[in-house]
Amino acid sequence: MSRRSMEVTADLVLRAYRHGLFPMAEGRSGGKLFWLDPVKRGVLPLHRFHLSRRLLRTVLSNQYQVTADRNFAGTIAGCATPLPDRMDTWINPQIERLFTELFRMGYAHSVETWRDGILVGGLYGVAMGGAFFGESMFSFARDASKVALVHLVARLRLGGFRLLDTQFVTDHLAQFGAEEIPRDSYKSQLAASVDAHAIWLPEPEPEVLEAEFRHLAASRSAQ
């Protein structure tokens, strides 16, 4: 279901997340936001993330350089950019302003994928306690958003996060193990996660990060 909101602030967004709701616009040019509370919620279990050997090789190669919180504005702008398979997005200027404010407040974070100094992919979301609410991702080059997602999951696992909320499940996310769970189950997981202690790690030690990537791929092989 959805509910209209007359005025949305960054603080209100944080309170809404705590109760399982999130805002979306009707479209890039839409002037109104809606609160969504889906009957089925998308989550990506951090302990069952699917990392293929092929993608592991890409992640470990020098094909892309990955950073976190380095270019939040560019990342959300990339997510709002129309693409051939996505001519419109739900990220309107108000959403951009709200999440940029959440970034300034220390709640929103981005993971950026670069090639030759150019931002070619990434994702952003909101961290509260041990929960990370994934908002959107984009890719202007092959595997660029996938590489960002692998980096996100590794950081969340290393930081002690318990919940990765994807809002919905797409074919893109399903290949990594994303699944739909009932609203009540989601809110139980949310309640157990949102006040848990976790640390956002924008720059883990490279050797620690690589070990986590290899662990993710090994866990997939053992499943």
Image (cartoon, rainbow, N blue to C red):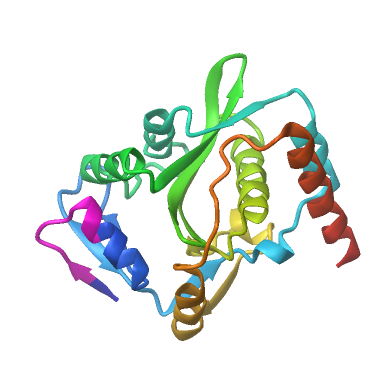
Which residue is painted at 52% across and 24% down in the image? 119
Q: Is residue 197 magenta?
A: no
Q: Is residue 110 above or below residue 157?
A: above
Q: Nearer the viewer, residue 6 or 171?
A: 6
**Which quadrant, please, contains the C terminus?**
bottom right
Which residue is painted at 45% across and 42% down in the image? 109
Q: Is residue 7 magenta?
A: yes
Q: Is residue 17 above or below residue 118?
A: below
Q: Is residue 187 visible?
A: yes
Q: Which residues are magenta?
A: 3-12
Counting from the top left corner in percent of width and height, residue 107 is at 38, 48
Residue projecting furthest to the left: 6
Judge left or right: residue 152 versus residue 24.
right
Q: Is residue 130 above or below residue 189?
A: above
Which residue is painted at 39% across and 34% down in the image? 81
Which residue is painted at 35% across and 41% down in the image? 103
Counting from the top left corner in percent of width and height, residue 126 is at 42, 52
Q: Is residue 139 visible?
A: no
**Which quadrant, please, contains the N terminus?**
bottom left
Quadrant of the rendered image containing residue 88: top left
Quadrant of the rendered image containing residue 104: top left
